[in-house]
Image (spheres, rainbow, N blue to C red):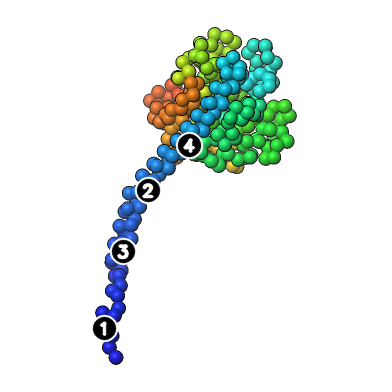
Amino acid sequence: MSFSSKNHPKAFTLIELLVVIAIIAILAALLLPALTAAKSRSLRVSCANNQHELGIALLVLADDNNNELPDLRYQPYGAATPGIPNPPNTSVYGLWPWDIAAEFTTNMIQNGATRNVFYDPANAAANADIWWNFGVAGAPGANSGFALPGRAYRITGYNWFLPGSGANAGGRPEQPYWQTNILGTPATFKYGANQGSPSRCAVCTDVIARDPKGNFNRIVMGGLSNFSLRTSHLNGNQPAGANCLFLDGHVAWRNWSDIFNPASPTTVRVFGGGNGNTPTFVF
């Protein structure tokens, strides 16, 4: 019995299959950068929305306080008694710019914010109980070595430039970058902050941080081997840039090349000095 070739469909040859695979690989290589760029843009927009919500809550909080921003060195945010000028850095609850007094987060949530908006969607892993409760004594997930009674603070996903934030970070003085009110009135009173036009004064920025070895994609926190704390928006192993919330409530993206100029490193504004495990924050 003979079989006619007409009864059997023609199969792909090995060469034809390899050609198809090669074409798919080329198309994937062409599409991947576009998909990555689209994802990055989406995360930037989500981050900007978070900061916008923080800005609304902050403006409401300032409106209830004679248009002034809270000074985190004084009670109930810090340890200093109101009315005492220039309290020491030890009055601040927290060590680094992403630390913020727990009482401040409570006030912000009362004014419409939520826990989620305190963390950048570009680094969603940082929104974890271990960091939200890091300095809150008795809270689930709190690190007992840093959670002291009466000195409650949280690690957030943004850097803050309120009076008192990051005051123990070392490195360059933080006071020139603290913002004090939402009216643009120059700060001529006790802490001499760099208050200017609300549209030009950043009050909250994405995290750009590097460890003493220059790594932007992992930060060792207090010896803990949890690397979810890192620069939020990365382009490979380098920062892509940062969203910045300004006192007038608008949010703007700044590219890394606009933030860091290697030809003029003295113009870079930083917190920290890279001692031991201490990261350096760039903004």
Q: Position of residue 118 (x, y in %)?
A: 56, 33
Image position of 18 (left or right of 80): left
Q: Earlier in the sequence, mark 3 or mark 2?
A: 3
Q: Earlier in the sequence, mark 3 or mark 4?
A: 3
From the viewer's side, name the closer residue of 239 and 8: 8
Q: Earlier in the sequence, mark 1 or mark 4?
A: 1
Q: Which residue is mark 2?
A: 32
**Marker count (numbered):** 4
Q: Which residue is mark 1?
A: 4
> Disc 4 residue type?
Ser
Q: Position of residue 232 (x, y in %)?
A: 49, 36
**Regarding mark 3 in the picture, which secondary structure is present there?**
helix
Residue depicted at 29% across the width and 62% down the height? 19
Q: Which residue is mark 4?
A: 46
Q: Earlier in the sequence, mark 2 or mark 1?
A: 1
Q: Residues within 10 Å of mark 3 (few under 14, many from 20)?
A: few
> Disc 1 residue type?
Ser
Residue depicted at 64% across the width and 11% down the height? 85
Q: Position of residue 208 (x, y in %)?
A: 49, 32
The reply to whether the C-beta atoms of the residues labelled 1 and 3 are less than 8 Å apart is no
Residue lying furthest top: 188
Q: Which residue is mark 3?
A: 18
From the viewer's side, name the closer residue of 214 and 35: 35
Q: Position of residue 180 (x, y in %)?
A: 55, 16
